[in-house]
Image (tube, rainbow, N blue to C red):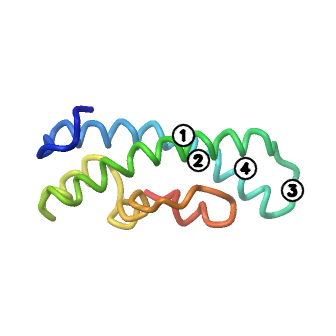
Amino acid sequence: MSHLSSIPDFVEITTFIQERVATLRQPARQWADLARLSLQGQPHDAQRLSELEARINAIRAELRGVVLVASEHFTEEQLHILRKQAGISKFAWRAFQSKRPVTTKHGFSLIIY
């Protein structure tokens, strides 16, 4: 990803977001399964849950900066196209703007597409 201090390239931003969101899908599913078990008080792999949270939060941190830049520089029409190509909803777009980390307390509101 090039330096984001200038006007961003729509195709480059879209490609980056698509790739990172695709990378996030599998760990998010695994996290959701383990988090449900945890919240239900059932046996689960707490170490794996912690690892998934760290990985998801790292990817979300990468996405957050790019999503904020895109939101500032692109029109609503461009953002709609970008979200459609990345396969995420408007609500998920807003969730990527949040600094809150994914935890079992409020992670389900952040892990959404």
Q: Mark 1 or 4 closer to N-term?
A: 1
The tag on residue 26 is 1
> Is residue 90 visible in this depiction of the protein?
yes
Q: Residue at the location (25% across, 47% down)?
A: 85
Q: Are marks 1 and 2 in contact (CB under 8 Å)?
A: yes
Q: Is label 4 in a helix, a strand or a loop? A: helix
Q: Are marks 2 and 4 in contact (CB under 8 Å)?
A: no
Q: Mark 1 or 3 closer to N-term?
A: 1
Q: Mark 2 or 4 closer to N-term?
A: 2
Q: Position of residue 14 (x, y in %)?
A: 23, 43
Label 1 and label 3: CA atoms lie apart by 22 Å
- Amino acid on which the number 1 mark rests in the picture: Gln
Q: Are marks 3 and 4 in contact (CB under 8 Å)?
A: no
Q: Which residue is mark 3?
A: 42
> Is residue 80 visible in this depiction of the protein?
no
Q: Residue at the location (52% across, 57% down)?
A: 111
Q: Position of residue 102 (x, y in %)?
A: 59, 56
Q: Position of residue 91 (x, y in %)?
A: 38, 67
Q: Residue at the location (59% across, 63% down)?
A: 108
Q: Which residue is mark 2?
A: 29
Q: Which residue is mark 4?
A: 34
